[in-house]
Image (cartoon, helix red, strand yellow):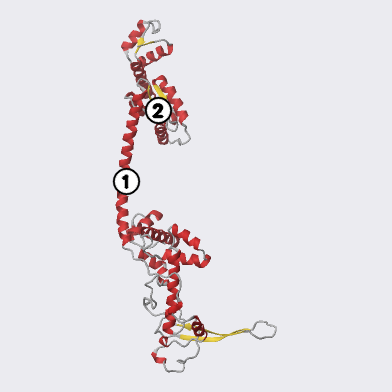
Amino acid sequence: MISVSTFEACQRIKQAATTKGDEDMLHVLRGVNDDLIAADAKYHKNCYALYVMNSKKVVHSSEAGNESETPYDKAFHQLIDELNPGIKEGRAYDMNSVLIMYREFLADEGVAGEDYTRQCLKDRLKNFFGEEVVFHQQTDRAKPELIYASSIGLQDVINAWALTRKAENKVNQENEKEKTRPIACVARDIRTEIKKSKGITTRPLDSRDIAIELTRKLIPDCLYWLVRAIITGESDGSNQPKECCNITVERQILSICQDIIHCCTRGRVKLPKHTGLAITVHHLTSSKHLITLLNKMGHCCSYDEMRAIDTSAAMELLAKTEEFGTVIPSNISPGVFVQLAADNNDINEETLDGKNTTHATTMVVYQKKAYGPDPSPVPLADHRVKRRSLQCTKYRSARHMAVDLQHPPMPTKLIPKCIKGSAIHSPRPVRWI
């Protein structure tokens, strides 16, 4: 038992009895002329704390309806109502949680409480509770202070707080699992669709395969609409157009989708972006390190793969040259009527003797585009083996190739049957452009 030794304790007991309407306590106080010190009164620490704390709650309830209170006072009273039951039950609160709670109450009152500090809230709690609560700083300074009733032991508070935090963490983990479970199901379904993607053929590479129209057909619908919903915020894909109105956003969506497919399949599925970007970067910079860096970040194919694509294109060109007897542009189709136009291309450079000036003949080939879709190209070279460099031993020697380029014969397979045998069909030198 503790003896009443201060006038402040006498005043608190009297004020608590008056506020609660405790006639028995008021009768005792009037019997000793409100002088508990002279009467050598004694009290139990826990009983004194609970008696005075309950009186403060009654005072707070009576003042809650006062319209002159500031938003900070109203939020603080709501915080006290939230903390009082737990403190009386022996619970402990960390100051971080208390501060977050107080800021939420301020937000409800229309006040931005981000600048309200922990120390200001601690001082206000001290002024309100006095000696009824204790602020304990843990051994690890990085952990927040604990606030609990002074009537209970420190070890009990720490154990109760640890159990409470453990239970809260378990609940939070369960909530996170519930949130991530649907995401995992969606990711599994999309991954299954990605595994069905076939990509494009890169040996040899057809320039039509890297067009944006074909790219959309290579991407699974579920992946496309997921990325599009994340970027644009479109929730219902059934009421939306198949492509974004903004071509820049559409290109970004397709780029991200191709990156996901490339990473998911470990680069086994060849895609337009990763093939075209590697070839373009090499054409502009000739940098192996830059292509390797982009490949490690998942933006393009490897340097070896890019070299194999270039080599297959050269092999296909040489095979066509062997087949048709001359170099034929890729946009000229065999068996379709062609028109040719030729003219002199003379450049009279200024030389000292007026000799060795340029005199050439330029020829252009015209061919009408066939109606309907273009036929799929038929590879002429053997692309089953992946090669990084060109091997010319299977084809004609470099000296013969140089002679053929100077005087290539007219390719007979490109001339329709209706004009074969005419004056046009002759071994006259022709240069294709």
Q: Residue at x 34, y 19 (%)?
A: 50
Q: Quadrant of the N terminus?
A: top left
* Foreground pick, 322 / 360: 322
Mark-to-mark CA distance, 1 and 2: 31 Å
* Foreground pick, 324 / 344: 324
Badge 2 density bin: few <14, some 14–19, many ≥20, Cα 10 Å: many
Helix, strand or loop at mark 2: strand
Q: Is residue 18 above or below residue 179?
A: above
Q: Residue at x 48, y 66 (%)?
A: 280
* Foreground pick, 89 / 383: 383
Rendered image: mark on residue 179: 1
The answer to which image quadrant residue 165 occupies is: top left
Rendered location of residue 154, percent (x, y): 37, 23
Q: In this rendering, does residue 330 appear at all?
A: no
Q: Is residue 273 above or below residue 130?
A: below
Rendered location of residue 108, percent (x, y): 40, 36
Q: Which residue is mark 2?
A: 146
Left or right of residue 286, residue 130 in this image: left
Q: What amino acid is found at the position of numbered circle 2 in the picture?
A: Leu
Rendered location of residue 273, percent (x, y): 43, 64
Rendered location of residue 261, percent (x, y): 37, 60
Q: Residue at x 36, y 58 (%)?
A: 264
Left or right of residue 13, residue 291 in this image: right
